[in-house]
Image (tube, rainbow, N blue to C red):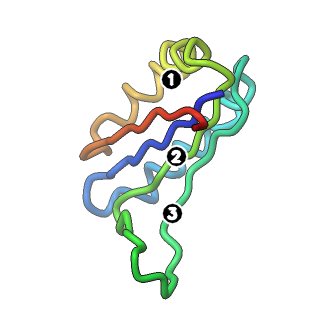
Amino acid sequence: MIHVIATITAQPGKRDELLKRFRDLVPQVQAEQGCIEYGATVDVATQLPPQQLVGDDAFVVVEKWDSVEALQAHLMAPHMLEYRAEVKDLIAGTSLLVLEPA
């Protein structure tokens, strides 16, 4: 199993629109072979000193896949290619962590 942590930063003021489009995509991704978990998360305020916030224009996608091959297939799925083309102007940047249990 692998874990993916993707931070998506929207263009200023565009996070809500981007999140709506992302949520519309989620059922298709969750139906993909090898998808264990896939969903968006946003900051929650706490009093934990080491907490880092992603901010008002970003969200974090938490994913689990049964293999690297499943992740690679996901990235090339027709609905993902279409989604990326549709939202490219809403995105300011992304960062990606692909991890495995230690």
**Residue closer to the observer: 35 or 76:** 35
**Rounded to the nearest whole Å, what is the CA distance between mark 3 and mark 2?**
9 Å
- Residue drawn where x is 45% and y is 55% of the image: 59
- Residue drawn where x is 59% and y is 39% of the image: 63
Q: Quadrant of residue 36?
A: top right
Residue holding disc 2: 61
- 4 sits left or right of 92 in the view: right
- Identity, as a three-letter code, of the amino acid under mark 2: Val
Give coordinates of residue 32: x percent, y percent.
70, 21
As helix, strand or loop, the secondary structure at mark 3 comes to loop
As helix, strand or loop, the secondary structure at mark 1 comes to helix
- Identity, as a three-letter code, of the amino acid under mark 1: Met
**Residue closer to the observer: 26 or 102:** 102
Q: Which mark is residue 8?
A: none
Residue holding disc 1: 80
Decide: is 84 above or below 45. above
**Quadrant in which the N terminus is drawn:** top right
